[in-house]
Image: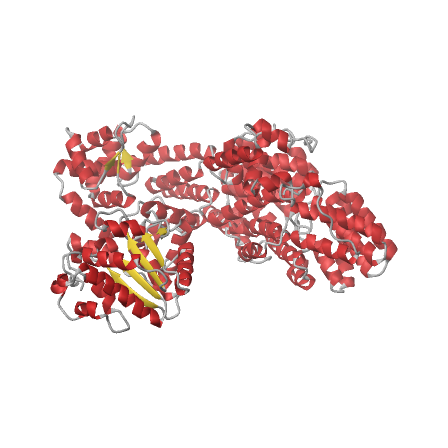
Amino acid sequence: MRTARPTPGAVMTPEDVRHDLHHSPVPDDAFCGRGPELAALRQDFTDASAGTPRLVLLEGPGGIGKTALVRRFLDSLPDPCVLHASGEENESALPCGVLAQLVGQSPLPVPETLAGLVRVPQSLHANLPPLAAGFGLLDLLSEVQSKGPVVLVVDDAHWSDPESLNALTLALRRLRHDRVLAIVAVRDPHVPELPDGLRRLLTDPRTRRLALDGLSPDELAALSDRLGVARLPHSASLRLHGHTHGNPLHARALLDQVPPDVLLDVTTPLPAPRSYAMLVLAGLAGCGAQTQRLVQAVSVLGLSCRPHAAARLARVAQPLPALERAVKAGLLRESPAGSSAPVIAFPHPLVHAAVYQDIGPAQRAALHTRAAALVDDEYSKLRHRVLAATGPDEELAAALAECARREAATGQWAVAGTHLRHASRVATSSLERDRLAVEAVEALLLDGRVQEAAELATGLPECAAPALRGYIRGYVARVQGRTQAAWTLLVDAWEQCDRERDPSLAARAAEQLSYAAVMCGRAAVAAQWAERAQRLSTAQGPSRMLRFNHLIALGLSGRAKEGIALAADLPDPMIVPLKSIDLLLARGELRLWSDDLHGARHDLLGAVANCRTTTVPLRLLSASALAQTLHRLGEWDEALIHAESSASIADDADQWWLKPVTHGVAAQLLAARGAWDRAAEHLRTAAEVPGGDETPLAYAYGVCAQGHFADARGEPHAVVEALRPLLAFAEQDGVNEPGVVDWQPLLVDALTKVGEFDEAEALLGPYEERARARGRHSVLAAAARVRGNLSAALRDTQRAQAAYARAQDHAAQVPLPFGQARVALDHGSFLRRIGRRSLAIAQLQAAHTTMTRLGALPYQALCERELNACGRASPPRPAEEQAPDGTGDPLEGALTPQELAVAQLAAQGLTNRQIATALALSVKTIEYHLGHTYAKLGITSRIGLVRRLGPPEASSPPPSAG
């Protein structure tokens, strides 16, 4: 029924292109996303199979994937009975054409009413009376149901003939207890081509409407992988999403047609797909010369611009008639009437790309040169100068580099990276070109664009200075988690560097060696390299990550007090300047490890609230450290929000070296609450990173989270299996530092439960010695608790009792609800086993209350089991702690976890923007949550929040400076 396609080599008309644009087949292995839509269709098929007919409206623009979604859904059904038809733009005048397609697919004899559709030419189909066609389709559906549920699909219904649509409407209206799922796919149900009756049916509230949007950036990255293109990094998939609006057809075309290096280079403009560009250019060719010049001028200025700017650039004396013609042709759109500053814009980025790429190189350079003279702001002027450049330009390279360094000083790493890449391309000497390229790689890495940075570093020529080339490749390897390779490259760069003539490069190599040493578990060495880097740093001062790493290295090597003292002079955390955020974050981490949890919380809230323009590593480290602090303080809802936020940042920014930390923290929180599936997902991501030989400290975080997962499930053998590999790194700095990862008590407890008493003792003794040397109460409490469990297993009742008493004394010195409850639970279990039931019940009830408040369901169940063994049911929660439903905290019962997290931050004095930064949400979302919170709590201002939640420091003393 479809017209023949042109033979290869034939000239394609716009009509040919339009057909191909909307009927390109989607390979099965290229399908991505659409999980909720597939689930909805499967549910409707289940309902239809049970005798409840369902109608689904599938709507979305051309190429969005309506046909692909239907095909994937049908492929998932076991031997379905399908009647499928699709409209054609050039066949919409053929009467009953779509109905004939449906009838022709019937597995049973066709009702006599419709038999003529398969026997006579289509030109005679008009003789079929409308009512007869509709009832004939209804009869056909009734007959076919005898073989099983029927899926009736009409694709591109807006191009179907009216006779078929009227018959379809009549049949669909009369389905009552039929086993039929009908799917009607259209671009827009309000197009005039649809009969009014069908439109009312499709927009009825009982019809399921599935409006397809574009694929997300992550789904586009997955699509690139499935099409055999290297998986796009987040920045490249984000650009492809913005360029195509996620339209799968256009995205697939670009992934097929554009070279990989252009896809990865976000500074290079993406073209339009060839078929799409032909349609756009055919429309442009039908306009007059002045309209063509105006549209081309707009494309040079960007996606949008002011009309007078386009007119000046195009040198069009009377722009309004030309603009009117462009708008009518669908090439441009103008801002609504009455706008204070009128703007003209392209209706889609692909239209812009088609027009811009069609301008010849000489004309394009001339237009950009004129545009640079017309615009006022520096960024736009530089952009036009770059696009007009035809070769090396020393003055332009210098201007770009100067602008990039100013942007970098304010944390605008994305802009800095773009300018530096352009500067490298127009630099006049090879040495300057290489230096600018290295600076661009640094900016890209600090912006979290690791794959782009790696591509640029790999492209550095072999003739580049060995120290420069080794330094930047070592830096990239370090961020990718290849620490051993990074160390070798960076040491070589350090040795080849002329520290007298180029102290800046030497300082940067020493800085990276400091980071690599921390990751290798050599904190004392890391501190030495950091001090060398600081001595060599130029007048611009050390980078923001260097000072952070120096303090962290001190903390990991047992010198936390020294590190805290170096950051003692900071102002209040909420007003710390951007240049000192690294010191604030480091101090917060050291306070966390040193048991100053309220001080850590204060510092880290300030770091998270003010780190919007800092480097990506600092942003995710701030969120992860705050999550760990809140976890220890018992504020688990808010802790989980920050933990999952930092994990998502690590994923989006390809920060492989930190994934075990961020995902491990999130998994530990979720496991303690019994959220097994979500915890397991984080553990899988953490395990994707190379093993402990490369990054022992990060590896320890991920492995320790596996141990906590198994512990929460009551599987001591799995705990031992997960944590035993850490014994090989027990002497590494950080891995063995009490208060950092603390995997030893977990492993000792599991070894005790499986009867490996000698191994447990061999591990616990050195840990206790190190804990006593540090004097950290949380660590001493955990060590004493597992000592009590080990002594109890060895039937040394006296030593066990003494150990539990020490554990409770130490736990009482730190605001550590979960740790205190673990001590009470283990002590209560011990007391029950030796027959001291009344004392046991008191301990177990205290533990149960805390576990219930935290939502630690696996451990709450342990408390209840022990209480039941004592002959005492678990107690109800006190009335003053109960929500309206009697199940929890009064605010927790009234507010969702995210509303509660927002309310707590607002009560602490953070602005809406600071809360948005802290929780990785939009300001509008924060306003929405606060509005709901005020309504639920019956208050009208933040003063009311403070009264309900308590002042920021009501429960804790102000943090000390040291």
- Residue 110 is drawn in which quadrant? bottom left
Whether residue 626 is visible: no
**Residue lying furthest right in this view?**
798
449 vs 882, left or right, is left
Residue at 56% across / 44% down in the picture?
Answer: 641
Q: Where is residue 374 in the image (x, y as percent from the top left)?
A: 26, 28
Whether residue 950 is visible: yes
Q: Position of residue 612 (x, y in %)?
A: 49, 36
The C terminus, quarter of image: top right
- Residue 165 is drawn in which quadrant? bottom left
- Residue 429 is drawn in which quadrant? top left
The number of numbered badges drawn on the structure is 0
Foreground residue among 800 and 759: 800
Please determine whether, in this image, residue 241 is positioned above or below residue 939: below
620 vs 394, left or right, is right
180 vs 648, left or right, is left
Q: Position of residue 229 (x, y in %)?
A: 36, 58
Foreground residue among 107 and 711: 107
Instruction: Tell me the colour scheme of the image.
Output: secondary structure
Please determine whether, in this image, residue 292 is positioned above or below residue 479: above
Foreground residue among 711 and 658: 711
Q: Position of residue 130 (x, y in %)?
A: 19, 59
The N terminus, quarter of image: bottom left
678 vs 251, left or right, is right
